[in-house]
Amino acid sequence: MSHTPQKQYYPTPATYYYPARANQAYVQPSAALTTGVFGMVVGGTAAMAVNLHRMQDNKMTLGHAMTDSLAKGAAVGVATAAGVAAARAVGSSGLTCLVVLLATATGVGYVINTVGKPTEKTSRSIKSEKQEKGE
């Protein structure tokens, strides 16, 4: 008597289909935060390198150099984080993301650098007031 093996049938595994995200224009806070910290370190060290030359020329003290470097590093970090967040929100091709990142970071950096500085009209009025007082 020969024994023929019977075919064994196994149930097919269930297949799950997950819907694709229609729009991935969301920002991961960790990505913006990480690049912001990296930008702060790079910007701060670059500013400190410049300030060290100013210290050697006796144009700046160590305390002022450190404060200036920290402030510039923080500004670069904020600009970098904003640029990366905007580029990730756009979420299209590499060149478009690069352009958005550069434009946003430049704009944020410009705004940060102009805060607290007098405008040309204000500086002219300050100069005219000083001339009137004889200073």
Image (tube, rainbow, N blue to C red):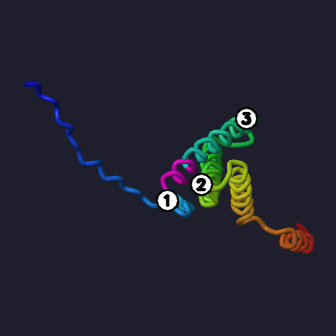
- N-terminal of the pair, mark 3 or mark 2, is 3
Q: Amino acid at mark 3?
A: His
- Secondary structure type for disc 2: helix
Q: Earlier in the sequence, mark 3 or mark 1?
A: 1
**Above or below — where is 55 with respect to 106?**
above
Mark sitting on residue 81: 2
Secondary structure character of the magenta stretch overall: helix
Magenta stretch: includes residue 35: yes
Q: Which residue is at the far front?
A: 1
Q: Secondary structure at mark 1?
A: loop
The residue sitting at 63% across, 52% down in the picture is 80
Q: Is residue 118 above or below residue 53?
A: below
In the drawing, does residue 63 fall left or right of residue 53?
A: left
* Residue 3, numbered label: none
Residue beneath the point at 72% across and 38% down = 50
- Depth-wise, is mark 1 or mark 2 nearer the camera? 1
Question: How far apart are the two marked residues, 3 and 1, measured between alpha carbons?
Answer: 54 Å
Q: CA distance from mark 3 to mark 2?
A: 28 Å
Circles 1 and 2: CB atoms closer than 8 Å: no
- Near mark 1 (Cα within 10 A), the count class, few <14, some 14-19 or many ≥20, is few
Q: Quadrant of the N terminus?
A: top left
Magenta part of the protein: which range? 28-36
As rendered, which of 36 and 134 lies closer to the eye?
Answer: 36
In magenta segment, residue 50? no
Classify 10 Å Cα crowding around label 3: few (below 14), some (14-19), many (20 and above): few
- Above/below status of 7 relative to 22: above
| Residue that numbered label 1 is attached to | 20
Q: Extreme left residue here?
A: 1
